[in-house]
Each structure stands twice: as structure tokens, then as C-alpha cells.
Amino acid sequence: MTATLPMKSARPARPARPPGRTLELRVAKVLGMDADARRALAAIEALAGSARVAVPGRFMPDPGVQAHLAKLGVAEQVPEADFFKFRHLVIPCSGIAPRDRKRWQEAVPQLTDLSTPQVRRAQVALGLLRMEGAQPLVIGRHDDPESQALAGVIPGTRIIEDTTDTARLHFSPAYGVVCQTTLSPRRVSWLLQQLRMRFRDARVTFLDTASPAMTAREQALEDLLDWCDGVVVVGQQGEASCEALVEAALRKGKPACTAASPASLDSFELAAVRRIALTAGAFALDGTVRAIAAMLLSR
């Protein structure tokens, strides 16, 4: 989508856009939720209409989704001690460790697994690699619930976020590696290369568990980077898929910001930007994307 409107001046404290300059906005062809995320959201919406629903953690790491579920009466980040208060427990999209699933099945009347198929596939893949005798590794982020859920499949699994983690590994004759599904494929490839360079005498088996949607989002943004002056990523700042898109922009030297709502754009300097590429992370709602696009065009 390409749109051109006269650019209104922003707040008085900001430099005004030169007279006659217009803002052009193009929206990436692939952005936001994929089909699996949409099905998961529709499923929890249906459950919320018939029962009290609890989620151990956040269902999706996005403020818009969090606000939407709160309106439906879904309780997120519910501690295990309070599960008895709810009729239905929903496993979030990031998944949970198998030991938690087994324990929770005995604690609630109904347990529904809405983790994404990619996460479940990664958990199975890691188990198969361990059966082959490999030291299990997850390329991901230490603080991300998905990486933690993957690492929880097998005791002793290590999470590799950067080269510091690789340097701290002890040698093993074989490593079995999967990756967090929402990471940038480029980042995964780079960390895998670093692992292989450090342990040249080890057998490193990598099963690519990155989401195809993540690859498509990144490619769709890269298609716009030669055209644009700046990038706006719709989603929660710090969320893995949003960070991957920001990194894609920075590799091309293009300024980028992550906005969870139209109000978040206040911190992004747009006076010098004439062409904006708009994309969205893996959990951004369509309504949030439309609202931010409208805000950009009205400034």
C-alpha cells in the first residue's frame, strides 16, 4: 500500500517538515500475525465466551492482544497457586515445558494447548536430537518464554543468545540445535556459524525451526528498504520478531522504531523522514497496524 498526504507539522518542539514535503507510506506485503497465530487468538476468544480462562504467562507478547483479552475477561500471568479459581487453563503461544504440562493437567478441569505448531515442532525436534546423543542447544533469547519452554524439554539444555554463550560452552562430541521460531533467520545462521567455528571437531546438527512467516516478514521489509528513509515496526518493543525487523532496517542504515500504539510514535522523529516503510511483528493486531498507519498519514 502506498499513500501520499500533506505532512502536518508535529508538536511545536519538533522541527517542522519543509514546506511542500509529503509523507509516503508503504506497507510491507507480509506483516503481523500468520495464520497459526490468528487461529490461536480465535480459539481463546471462543473459550472466553463460555468459561473463565486463565493463561500462565502472556498469551501473546503484544500490548494490543493483552488489552483485547482483558476486555474478554481472560486472566493472564496467573500463578500456579491460583489455577483452581478457573475452569479453563490455556497454554500460551510460546508453549510450556512438558513437565509443567503434566503437572497442570492434574490441577485444572480443562487444559487447552494453543502453543503454535512451530513451537511444538521445535520441542519434538530437540527431543529427537537428544535421543541421538547430542548436547541440546536452543538458539534464542534467555528472557523469552518460548526459548525457556524449548529449553525445558530436556534438562541441561543451554540457550545460545550471543557469542558469550557459545564461549561458555564445554566441548561435546555432538550438539543438537534448534532455534526460537521468531528469531531472525540471519541471526540464527550467524550464531550457528560461530558455534561450528568454535567446535570444529564436534558434530553440529541443526534442525531449522524458524517460522516461515518470520522469513517472509523480513524479506517483505527488505524489499522496501532501498526505497524508504525510515521504518516503523508495529508491536512490542523488545519482542523477538520486532527486534528482528528493526535489525533488518539497521543493516541497511535506515532508522527504525517499534510502536505498540499510535501514541508510541511520539518518541520517533519524523520531521526528516519522507518515505516510511510500515511492517509489524508476529503478534500485532490488524487494528493496531491500521491505527498506526492512519496516525502516520495524519501527521
Image (cartoon, grey):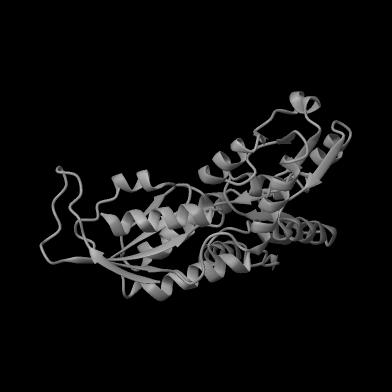
Percent x, y of residue 5: 25, 65
Q: Is residue 124 left or right of residue 284?
A: right
Q: Nearer the viewer, residue 131 or 235?
A: 235
**Quadrant location, the N terminus:** bottom left
Report the residue that reaches farthest toward the left. Answer: 19
Q: Is residue 236 left or right of residue 197?
A: left
Asked where in the image residue 225 lies, by quadrant, the reply is bottom left
Q: Nearer the viewer, residue 39 or 205?
A: 39
Q: Nearer the viewer, residue 75 or 57?
A: 75
Report the residue that reaches farthest toward the front. Answer: 49
Q: Is residue 274 visible?
A: no
What residue is rendered at 65% in x and 37% in y?
57
Q: How many marks?
A: 0
Percent x, y of residue 93: 68, 50
What residue is rendered at 17% in x and 52% in y?
9
Q: Nearer the viewer, residue 171 or 195?
A: 195
Q: Is residue 205 above or below residue 258?
A: below
Q: Is residue 73 visible?
A: yes
Percent x, y of residue 122: 73, 59
Q: Is residue 71 above or below residue 31?
A: above
What residue is rendered at 16% in x and 47% in y?
14
What residue is rendered at 42% in x and 72% in y?
222
**Quadrant location, the C terminus:** bottom left
Percent x, y of residue 275: 28, 67
